[in-house]
Amino acid sequence: MAHDWQPDFEQLVDDHQSMVFSIALRMTGDRGLAEEIAQDVFLELDKHLGKIGSPEHACFWLRRVTMSRSADALRRRRVRSTDLWVEFEEHHGAPVEVRDSPLGARLELLLATLPEAQRAALVLRYQEDLTPDEIAATLAEPVATVKSHLQRGLKLLRAKATDHLREYIRDKKEYIRGV
Amino acid sequence: MKCRILAFVLGAAALAAPARTQNSPLPLPPPVEKELAARASNVTEVTLGKNMLGFAARFMNGKDKDEAATRQLIEGLDGIYVRDYTFDKDGQYSIEEIDKLRQYFETSEWSPLVHERERKGAESTDVMVKLVNGESHGMFILTVEPRELTIVLILGPIHMDELGKLKGIGGLGALGSVEKGAKNKDK
Amino acid sequence: MEEFEQELRQAFERRPAPPSLKRKLMDRRADQRGTQRRRGHIQLWQRLAASLILVALVSGAAEWVRHDREERRQGEAARQQVLTALRVTGRALDHMNTQLAAHDRTEQR
């Protein structure tokens, strides 16, 4: 029963650190910054542990605060899309070549070039698999606004992805030719 | 031997003058006062040293003309010592007791100003002034009536005309009359 | 669009958190708790000191009020004594004047 649930901090960290880290990473495009944000979020959770009533509440709370902290971090830092590309590759750690899908790898990079609001909606939709209503609750935005962000974000991302794929294929061809 | 002589001299000197309260020029009450007070139906005893007079002056109403004058008078004084004994009937005190009182306060520092006696001896008034370099630094009054004894000792630079100005307060008499009386006495 | 969205879901799979994250987090948490305890102790002492100061101030103020009231009472008592002394002096002087006047009348006869 929900009221019998007692939050265990370390357990919550184990259960949700990937989620928190990934949201922060996809929002900021900076691995180091994402790790810092994740730590801050959990430390804040520790302070508010008494108010967390259920595992679902914990999850919701973590998403919301991670989004908020990420937005704060972005505000403190002006992000230009080209710089972010470079940073993303430098800070991600795993080289993009090992990815199964070359498109998938670049989509993450392209995500970083989207406006923040659209990025947030897309991360919560496609990483966290939240419905537009759930996204609206997390971001404290009207559902209509969320849907608009999702729509525009998808369109923009798709357009960028298509352009990028063309470039990628061209680069690959040249590479093969060179060998 | 020398110590004994010194002790004797000091003791004699102490007897000659009324005992003083510590750090105050006001004398300690003579023993006879206790006996008079025991017989009196009404006793008024006021002993105010310099500090107490200064303290009292702070609480005088500066806006009141009389109290302002009083304040000015008492602020410079070193002490006020007043005793007033009222008796139910005549003969509650003896001449010897009055003499004891007078002698207690009458030291070499004091110059008699008034020494008035009724022929029958029932009433008398003694006024003495303490003069320092020709300036008045104290006033002693001893009035004796059949049923009332009053001792007033005021120490400090007291000017007769100041007392005279305080007519309105408690009916102080014009001290000009004291001087006139003294002059008449000298004749 | 559905295929693209599928690609997105795949691309946006959660990344494992760095192994150092939990360790660093727990270290920071332990530090913070230590600091909070110290801060708590300091705050406790500060609160205690503030309470003591407040008590001292209040009792000091109460004492001052009491002292002031007592001083006023004593001052009024002293004032009354002065006035009494001067009244007695005045009566004594009046008596003296009466006696002197009687003496003068006697001498003039």
Image (tube, coloured by chain):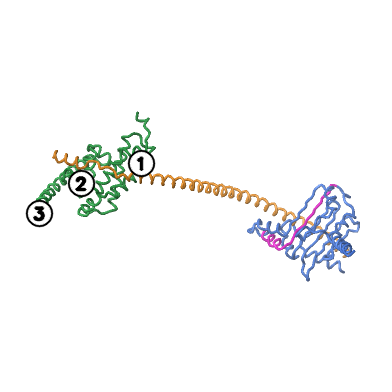
Chain colours: A green, B blue, C orange
Name the mark on residue A85.
Answer: none
Q: Is disc 3 in the same subunit as disc 1?
A: yes
> Which residues, given as a range, are shown in magenta?
B67-88
Q: Is disc 1 in the same subunit as disc 2?
A: yes
Asked if residue C63 lies left or right of residue B133, the reply is: left
Tell which of A104 and B27 is nearer to you: A104
* Disc nearest the viewer among 3 and 2: 3
Tell which of B148 and B39 is nearer to you: B39
Judged from the image, the secondary structure of the residue bearing numbered disc 2 is: helix
Q: Dot 2 corresponds to which residue?
A: A108
Q: Dot 3 corresponds to which residue?
A: A178
Q: Is residue A24 visible?
A: yes
In this view, which residue lies farthest toward the front? Answer: A179
Q: Amino acid at mark 2?
A: Glu
Q: Dot 1 corresponds to which residue?
A: A45
Residue B141, percent from left and from top: 81, 60
Residue B3, percent from left and from top: 87, 63
In this view, which residue lies farthest toward the bottom? Answer: B133
Q: Residue at x 85, y 50 (%)?
A: B35
| First of labels 1, 2 by sequence position | 1
Tell which of A16 and A95 is nearer to you: A95
Q: Chain of mark 1?
A: A
Q: Residue at x 79, y 62 (%)?
A: B139
> Disc 1, disc 2: CB below 8 Å?
no
Q: Chain of mark 3?
A: A
Q: Please, is residue A41 above or below residue B2 in the view?
A: above
* Disc nearest the viewer among 1 and 2: 2
Residue B98, percent from left and from top: 87, 56
Tell which of C72 and C103 is nearer to you: C72
